[in-house]
Amino acid sequence: MIVEMRRGASEEQVNGVVERAHTYGFETQLNIGTDKVVVAILGSDTGRVPTENFAVLPGVQSVTRIMRPYKLASREFKEKDTQVQIGDIVIGGPKVAVIAGPCSIESRDQFLSTARAVTEAGATLVRGGAYKPRTSPFSFQGLQEEGVNLLEEIRQEVHAPVVSEIIDPHHLDEMVEHVDVLQIGARNMANYTLLRAVGRSGKPSILKRGLASTVTEWLQAADYMLASGSAQVILCERGIRTFETSTRFTLDIASVAVVKRDSHLPIIVDPSHAAGHYQLVPTLARAALAAGADGLLIEVHPDPTNALSDGLQSLTFSDFRRLMADLRLIAQAMGRTL
Ligand code: PEP
Ligand code: MN
């Protein structure tokens, strides 16, 4: 249930709503806008209380029952687009963010050369996996702590924020210190302990869509993070499992439109994991920008033929530069910059 307060409602009136919610055993979260306050009433059984019980309270403008199972990520709770601030970079504003780098950090040279190449080409954030969630336990699992040290080194050397995946809440302290944006991978979208821990950290984060999750389940996962105190969540569409086998995953470009309509959170697209093949990545990247995505997450490697993970879907430096030139034109056509 969403309670919209009148413009200029007093703190006491807002507290009245919060207290009534508590008497029913519900939790609340406030969205304090520039001219009005919206109170989300949170609970799995808010349906048992009539909306009138809140509508009669002084200072209340309207009460809306949210039929969707997610609340804090919904546009009903927060109408204005959320902008996530990472240093002086904003994700969810007019400027499109390109995040690029290798799937895994393999060595200092490999990571530094990629970070330099992608930032020179116009990427504003650098990605690199230190802890890798691999389908097989026998595949390369990432350089782990050594990888985190390299993230810190490269972030200072290249002066760009770094994005890296967190797979275990035990790594939180280490990663919060050395990483600017924590990525929650597709395989962990429903790892609620991890979502809560990252949410509590308040760190900007990227929440990837689970490979067999609906948009609704994805936004419910975002609610876990928002309910834990974070306001800094970026959604990332990365393709889902369908009957189609010609791509690694099916890029659900429609989810960009659905998320833009139903949520205030920024959404970026990862064309690399969806395509699974470097030849297809530029087309999917261009389509994502044209669909209104706020950014892209793209895998780039200095020598894809010898990459330790996801070489087949990684762009070379020159492929990436060419793609950036195309993306600039599309951003411009969409009234955005890149
Ligand atoms: C990745 O970004 O390298 C990754 C593992 O992505 P996903 O979680 O989408 O599979
Ligand atoms: Mn990868």
Image (cartoon, rainbow, N blue to C red):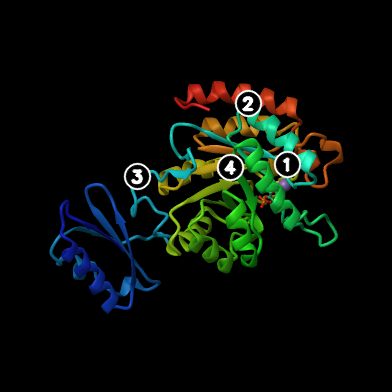
Residue 174: x %, y % from top left: 63, 60
Residue of label 4: 161
Q: Which mark is residue 80?
A: 3
Residue plotted at (59% across, 26% down): 327
Secondary structure at badge 2 equals helix
Secondary structure at badge 3 equals loop
Q: Are marks 4 and 2 in contact (CB under 8 Å)?
A: no
Residue 217: x %, y % from top left: 52, 59
Residue at disc 4, CB closer than 8 Å to ligand 1 = no
In primary-sequence order, the first of circles 4 and 2 is 4
Query: What is the CA distance from the residue labelled 2 to the residue labelled 1?
Result: 16 Å
Residue of label 1: 102
Q: Are marks 3 and 2 in contact (CB under 8 Å)?
A: no
Quadrant position of residue 108: top right
Which of labels 4 and 2 is toward the front?
4
- The amino acid type found where label 4 is placed reads Pro
Query: Does residue 271 show up?
Result: no
Query: Does residue 178 show up?
Result: yes
Query: What is the CA distance from the residue labelled 4 to the residue labelled 1?
Result: 15 Å
Mark 1 crowdedness (10 Å alpha carbons): few <14, some 14-19, many ≥20: many
Secondary structure at badge 4 equals loop
Query: What is the CA distance from the residue labelled 4 to the residue labelled 3?
Result: 26 Å
In primary-sequence order, the first of circles 4 and 1 is 1
Residue of label 2: 324
48 left or right of 149 in image: left
Mark 2 crowdedness (10 Å alpha carbons): few <14, some 14-19, many ≥20: many
- For residue 291, above or below residue 84: above
In primary-sequence order, the first of circles 1 and 3 is 3
33 left or right of 232 in image: left
119 left or right of 293 in image: right
